[in-house]
Image (tube, grey):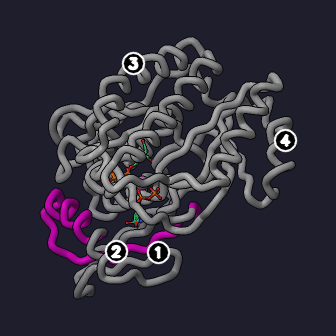
Amino acid sequence: MIKYWGKENKELIIPMNNSLSLTLDAFYTETMVTFSKDYLADSFYLDGQQQDEKATKKVSRFLDLVRQKANCSLFASVESHNFVPTAAGLASSASGLAALAGACNEALTLDLSPSALSRLARRGSGSACRSIFGGFVEWEKGSDDASSQAVPILSDHWEEELAMIFILIDDQQKEVSSRDGMERTVETSAFYDGWLSSVNDDLKEAKAAIADKNFQALGAVAEANALKMHGTTLAANPPFTYWSPDSLKAMNLVRHIRQTGVPCYFTMDAGPNVKVLCQKSEVPAIMATLETQFSKDRLTCAYSGPGLTILETEVNK
Ligand code: ADP
Ligand code: DP6
Ligand code: CO
């Protein structure tokens, strides 16, 4: 709803600004981690495929943080399934790293509190700190490792009345990762100051809208905030954009639906896919119009969902 875009501290992943998201039921990750003295190295399987050295190293670096906390030196096997396209701007790093943090906490019986898990997940991918929790979540930027964490936002179950329709434009891996995109933007974009000086007002508006259950106010500020974030990339050096022609087509269609009197607003993350925030009751009408321009198999409706969920734990035999 209000984007995380830029790091104050890259090593610890302390963000430049607070951000706010809605955790969804669709697009999730299932991850199993096993630590064992039988392993001679870490291994990482994603969707049944053993990952290359670079991807495995990224996971290993996260595992090192966990091993340090647990005072453990065992290697691990990580088997993960993304029920979300990976690296396409659909928040696979948020679900993937939240799942990995949760699985490690179980595997090494670290007994971390939800807040401590949020801080741990943050070290893997910033957006993952929010995905530990369900519903509306704010990431409080804090100022150091101990204070930068997500907190659920009280909303009196209002999120249960909302929906997010995904218009899948492209599920392939993006050219510029979120990490590289935000770094380039912070370092070079002439528009980044404008982003930073206005994002806190957007956040205040979004939180007030949630407190008031004011759908149009939340949608309007979320849409404007997403456009502002994407605007910053155009003034980076070298400039870039996550948009494709079909992203614009989708955004225009959402504006058109809104003009016909059905409230709905779009948002986009670091990728070309467009997400439409609406009220549950309007889903059939909005879907019907979206289907006039996008094929049914490119449309997915998601609802508010839970955060980290432990499916099973196997105790050492
Ligand atoms: P996205 O928009 O999908 O979040 P990012 O560029 O932020 O894209 O992050 C993609 C990266 O997140 C992947 O290259 C990988 O390093 C990591 N990632 C995604 N899914 C998983 C997973 N299930 N387990 C571990 N790491 C993952
Ligand atoms: C555009 O959390 O994927 O989706 O912390 O470098 O792993 P890293 O980046 P990531 O960035 C997400 C950016 C965003 C906006 C958001 O999720 O708030
Ligand atoms: Co990401």
Instruction: Please tell me the numbered disc located at residue 55.
Output: 2
Q: Is residue 234 magenta?
A: no
How far apart marks 2 and 1 lie (CA) works out to 10 Å
> Along the line of sight, which residue is nearer the eye, 156 or 50?
50
Residue that badge 4 annotates: 289
Asked whether the residues under the numbered discs 2 and 4 touch, taking CB atoms below 8 Å apart as contact, a structural biologist would say no
Please state which amino acid type lies under the numbered disc 3: Asp
- Can residue 140 be seen from the camera position used here? no
Q: Nearer the viewer, mark 2 or mark 4?
A: 4
In the rendered structure, which disc, 2 or 1, sits on the residue that comes first in sequence?
1
Residue 92 location, x and y as percent?
A: 48, 58
**Proximity of marks 3 and 2: CB atoms separated by less than 8 Å:** no
| Quarter of the view holding residue 59 | bottom left
**Residue 225 falls left or right of residue 236:** right
Q: CA distance from mark 1 to mark 4?
A: 36 Å
Disc 1 is placed on an element classified as strand
Q: In the figure, is residue 116 to the left or right of 251?
A: left
Circle 1 residue: 46
Secondary structure of residue under mark 4? helix
Mark 3 lies on residue: 201
Identify the magenta region. Answer: 59-84
Does dot 2 land on a helix, a strand or a loop? helix
Q: What residue sits 31% from the left and 52% below the top?
A: 237
Q: Please tell me how crowded label 2 is: few (under 14), some (14-19), or many (20+) other residues with Cα within 10 Å.
A: some
Label 3 vs label 2, nearer the camera: 3
Q: Earlier in the sequence, mark 1 or mark 4?
A: 1
For residue 60: magenta? yes
Could you tell me which residue is drawn at 60 percent across and 16 percent down?
213
Marks 2/1 in contact by CB < 8 Å: the verdict is yes
Judged left or right of residue 157, residue 70 is left
Residue at the spot 39% in from the left edge and 41% down from the top edge: 232
